[in-house]
Image (spheres, rainbow, N blue to C red):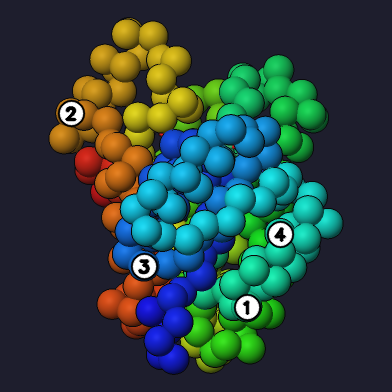
């Protein structure tokens, strides 16, 4: 709830599935109006909207490829048109294009950098103007332990996720005086479409590396995001919070 009693408004990029979906549901559950963003999964995004509305919340579905600045600008305009404010931005949309560095194509590099990193720059650029006017904002970037530790076959993804951490810290420094915080979450291995295709052998190897010996759930990441988006996190900015069962410490 904002100081004037109106509900907070949140944009969650890539919230038709997985972690983004869980974050959208959690923020709605805690009273925010939520913009559900998707690129290809219209039906899935509409299902998230229905789920929020059925439990008494409010949501708006907006298609936008967040790696395209014009799409991001339109998404911000639609948000303000509908809800007249913007308080919380969760930069969550992400893709993988795994390959050995020696064989990685320029297209694989560019796609991953554009969707995982450039998108967060575009969204932050446009959202921060509105948040600065309101003198309150929460920006949460979904990075990854891969950005802290590196990962096999993922030079593109690790570079993008490490880049998000630099973006988070500079944003935090620049916008602190305007009442806006910026933090990153670094999930470890979470049960979503991104990890469901693992062969049993790979799953076993991963579990051996995680002190808690299990994958995380999207809801466990969502609860961390909801904390960083809340009033309770008012003195926390520029931080990276791993949600990973102890994988990175
Ligand atoms: P996911 O299940 O594959 O979902 C990805 C989401 O991003 C979908 O909603 C997808 O929408 C959206 N998306 C993809 N490209 C987009 C674009 N250009 N514009 C707008 N939306 C786009 O992924 P996830 O596992 O939930 O991951 C979410 C975030 O957490 C990602 O940033 C990922 O890197 C990070 N992460 C995940 C894990 C993990 O273990 N799962 C670990 C560390 C970090 P459409 O379906 O409509 O295309």
SS for callout 3: loop
Figure quadrant, ligand 1: top right
**Mark 3 or mark 2, which is nearer to you?**
3
User: Does residue 240 appear in the picture of this structure?
Assistant: no
Give the label, 4 or 1, closer to the camera. Answer: 1
Distance Cα–Cα, label 4 vs label 2: 39 Å
- Compared to residue 248, the image places residue 76 above or below, namely below
Whichever of labels 4 and 1 marks the residue nearer the N terminus, that label is: 4
Residue 244 position within the rendered picture, expressed as x and y whole percent measured from the top left: 29, 42
Label 1 sits on a secondary structure element that is loop
The numbered mark, 3 or 4, whose residue comes first in the sequence reads 3
Q: Earlier in the sequence, mark 3 or mark 2?
A: 3
Q: Mark 4 points at which residue?
A: 75
Q: Mark 1 points at which residue?
A: 84
Q: In the image, what residue occupies the spot 28% across and 36% down?
A: 216
Q: Answer yes or no: do the residues labelled 4 and 2 have beta carbons within 8 Å? A: no
Indicate left or right for 8 with 190 as reference: right
Dot 4 and dot 1 residues touching (CB under 8 Å): no
Q: Earlier in the sequence, mark 2 or mark 1?
A: 1
Q: Which residue is drawn at 83% across and 57% down?
A: 70
Q: Name the residue under label 3.
A: 31
Residue 93 x/y as whole percent: 58, 45
- The mark tally for this picture is 4
Is disc 3 in contact with disc 4, using a CB cutoff of under 8 Å? no
Q: Mark 2 points at which residue?
A: 213
């Amino acid at each position: 709830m904002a100081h004037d009693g109106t509900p907070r408004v949140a944009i969650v990029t890539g919230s038709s599935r997985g972690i983004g979906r869980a974050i959208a549901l959690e923020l709605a559950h805690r009273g925010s109006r939520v913009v559900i963003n998707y690129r290809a999964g219209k039906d899935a995004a509409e299902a998230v909207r229905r789920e929020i509305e059925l439990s008494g919340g409010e949501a708006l579905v907006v298609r936008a490829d967040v790696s395209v600045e014009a799409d991001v600008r339109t998404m911000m305009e639609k948000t303000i048109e509908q809800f007249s404010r913007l308080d919380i931005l969760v930069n969550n949309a992400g893709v993988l294009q795994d390959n050995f560095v020696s064989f990685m194509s320029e297209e694989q590099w560019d796609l991953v950098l554009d969707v995982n990193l450039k998108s967060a720059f575009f969204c932050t650029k446009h959202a921060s103007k509105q948040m600065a006017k309101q003198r309150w904002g929460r920006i949460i970037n979904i990075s990854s332990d891969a950005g802290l530790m590196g990962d096999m076959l993922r030079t593109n993804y690790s570079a993008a996720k490490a880049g998000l951490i630099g973006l988070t810290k500079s944003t935090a420094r620049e916008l602190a005086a305007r009442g806006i915080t910026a933090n990153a979450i670094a999930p470890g291995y979470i049960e979503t479409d991104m990890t469901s295709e693992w062969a049993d052998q790979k799953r076993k190897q991963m579990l051996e590396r995680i002190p808690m010996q299990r994958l995380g759930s999207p809801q466990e990441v969502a609860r961390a995001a909801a904390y960083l988006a809340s009033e309770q996190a008012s003195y926390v900015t520029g931080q990276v919070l791993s949600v990973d069962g102890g994988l990175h410490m």
